[in-house]
Amino acid sequence: MPLNPAQAAAAAHGDGPLLIIAGAGTGKTRTLIYRVAHLIEHGARPERILLLTFTRRASQEMLSRAERLVGGSSRSVHGGTFHATSHRLLRRYGEAAGIPKDFSIMDQGDSEDLMQLSRAQLGYAKGAKRFPKKETLQYVYSRHVNTGLEMRDIIRDEYPQFTDYIDDFRRIYGDYTRRKHDRNLVDYDDLLLFWAGMLEEAPALADRIAALYDHVLVDEYQDTNALQARILRGMCRTHSNITVVGDDAQSIYSFRGANFRNILDFPKQFSGTTIVPLEQNYRSTPDILDVTNELIARAQERFTKHLWTERAVGEKPWLVAARDEQQQTTFVVDRILELHEEGMNLRDMAVLFRAGYMSADLEIELTNRKIPFEKWGGIKFLETAHVKDVLAFLRILENPRDEVSWYRILQLLPGIGETTARAAIDAMAALAWESGAFGRYNPPPRARAAHAALVALLDTLRTSESADAGSVSAEIAGVRSMYDAILKERYDRPEPRLADLDQLQVIAAGYPDREAFLSALALEPPQATQDLVGDKSRSEDDCLVLSTAHSAKGKEWDAVFVIWALDGWFPSSRSLSDPEQLEEERRLMYVAMTRARDHLAVIYPLNSYGSRMGSDYFVAQLSRFIDAGVREKMERVTLAAPAAEAAPEVQLPAVDLRALLRGRFG
DNA sequence: TTTTGAAGTCTCTCC
DNA sequence: GACTTCAAAA
C-alpha cells in the first residue's frame, strides 16, 4: 500500500525542521521509516542518521522494518533511547568532560538507596514532622533536573507539607551529588544532564558530538521533557535537520518530567518548521474511532485534529457493567475464549489496565484455565530484592567504589547492620578503594566470620576473572555459592527466588562481559519476564498480552479489553485533585482505547470487596471519562443486577470518609 | 549495636 | 499488602 499524500509529504521532506503530528493509528512508524529510507536514497549516510525512540522495543522494530525497506545499509543507522544514546556518547567522549570511563549506571532504585544514605548521614530532622522519604527525595530531584523547575516551586506545588524542609532537601542533594562523583556513579538524570552539558558547556566537544549526525529523528516527541529539548537543540546546532513525530493527545509521561507543551512549542523553538498532520487512521473501525474521538474531544489544550478512516463499519465498542471483580474477570476470560474459538489468535488480544497490580485476579484465572499470557509493565524482575542483591556483587567487582552495592551486600551478612556497614565503607574510602581494602578492614568480633567469607569469595571471583574463564554467568554462579544460603535463611519459600536467579544466569550468558551486562540491564530492562529468557520458542507461542496502559503505547491488537474503568482506578485517585493530572489520565485512557483494531470492551466492576484503603466493601462508579456523550456511542452490556447498573448515571464526587475522620481527629 | 516486632504510612505509570 | 520507622530485647 502506497503512502497517502500527507505521509508521502512527510517522508520526502527536504532539509530543515519537520513536525509530524500523527494521531493514533495513522501510520506514524511507517512514515518515519519511509523518511529514513528516503534520506538514505538521497545520499544521507546511514551511520550519520540518529533515530531516537522511546523504548528499546520501538527502536528495534523501527530498525528492522527499515532494513526490510532499504536493505542492510539501514543497519548502521544509530538508534536508541535518549538514555542509551547518552550512555554511548559518555563512554566515548565522557573522559574529556571529566566523567571517568568506567562509571556505573544507577537505576531509579539505586538512586533512591543512595539518597537514603545521604538522608541518614545528614541526620534529618528527627521527631517533629514527618521527613520526606527517599522516593520523594529522588522524585523531587529528578523532576528538578528534567524540567528545569525550581525546587522551591516543585515542593510548594506537589509537597506543600515539606516546605519547611527545603534547606534539608538542598543539603541532601549536595551530599548525593558529591557521593555520585566520589563513587563514580551516574544516575538516569545525569545521563541526560551530562549530554546536555557536553553540548552546552564545552564548545569543542559540542562541535565533535553534533558533527556525528546530519539528521536527527525523534519518535514520541510528546513524551520528551525540557532537558531533552535542550539536547536536541545542541545536537542541531550546525544544521536544523530535525524531524519529530508525536501526538499531543498521547502525552502520558509527565511524571517523568515530560511536557506536551514541548511538542506544541516545537515550531517556536525551531524556526521555519514544516508541520504535517496525519489524520487518516488505518487501525480502528469507525465505531471505535467515534468513541475515542469523542473521548479526546474533551481535552483542554491540543492540536486539533479529527481522525477518520475508510475502514468498513464493525461492531460498536462494548461498555460492560460487572457486579464485581470476579464477574469482570469471568467476562473477560469467556470473551477471550469466544474470540479465540472464532479464530482470533491470543496474541491479537490484550487486556489493559491503569496499574500493574490490577491484573492479579485475572492472572490467577488465566493460570487456572491454562491460557498462556505475558505481562508487560508492573513489578519488574530486576527490581526484586534478591536479583538486586546478586547484581550488587557484580557491581562492586565492576566498580569497587560502588557504595550503594557495598552497603547492600554488607547488610546481608549476619552480624553486620547499618552501622558496621557504614564503618566498613568508611574504612575502604580511607584506603582510596584499592582492591584489597575490604580485606584490610578490621570488623567487630561478631562479624569476623562473615567478613572472612566475603573476602574469600571476592578473591575467588577476582582471580577467576583474570584467568578469563570469568563469563558473567559463571560469576553469578560464584556469587550464589554464598548467596543462596542467605536467601534460604531469609525467606520461607525461596524456590521462586532461586528460579529467578537461574534465569538471571541464562540472561547473563547472552552478554560478552560484565560491563555490557550491567549497563544493558540498567538501560534496557526487559518488558516482560518472557523477554528475559532468550528462548525464542516461548515468545512465538500464541500468548495473550496483559499490559499497563503505559506499556501498551505504540502497540495495537484486534481485540482490546480495558478493565477497572472506575473513578479512582482509571483515573487514578491520586490525580483527582489536580486538573492537569486528570487531563493526563484522560489521554492515558485515550491511549488504551485507541489500541483496538476491531473489538473494544470497557469493563467496570461496580462493587469491590477488599482491603484497599482499609475499607471492606464499597460501591464504585464508572470512570468519569466515559461520560454520557461517550456512552451513547457504545453498546451497553449489563451483567450485573439492574440496581448496580443505575449507579453511574449520577456523578457523585468521590469521598474518602476515613480521610475526613483523620482530618478531624488525626 | 543488631535484631525483631509493632505501629503507621501510602499505594501507579518508566528511562 | 509492602515498606518504613521507632522502640524494646538480645
Image: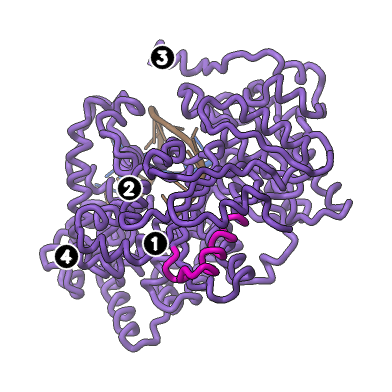
Chain colours: A purple, B brown, C blue
Query: Picture coordinates of residue A279 (x, y %)?
Result: 64, 41
Residue A338, horizontal then vertical, whole percent: 86, 47
Give the mark, 3 or 1, whose residue is nearer the N terminus.
1
What is the C-alpha distance between the residues marked 2 and 4?
A: 39 Å
* Left or right relative to A565: residue A168: left
Q: Which residue is mark 1?
A: A85
Q: Provide the secondary structure element on which disc 2 rests.
A: helix
Residue lying furthest top: A664
- The residue drawn where x is 38% and y is 64% is A213
Q: Is residue A42 magenta?
A: yes
Chain for mark 4?
A
Q: Is residue A225 left or right of residue A319?
A: left
- Residue visible at 39% across and 12% down in the picture: A665
Q: Which residue is mark 3?
A: A663
Furthest toward the bottom, the residue is A467
Q: Secondary structure at mark 1?
A: helix
- Evaluate if marks 2 and 4 touch, with contact meaning CB atoms under 8 Å apart: no
The quarter in which the C terminus of chain A is drawn is top left
In the image, is residue A18 part of the stretch drawn in magenta?
A: no
For residue A428, the mark is 4
Q: Is residue A407 visible?
A: no
Q: CA distance from mark 3 to mark 4?
A: 49 Å
A517 over A385 or under it: above or below: below
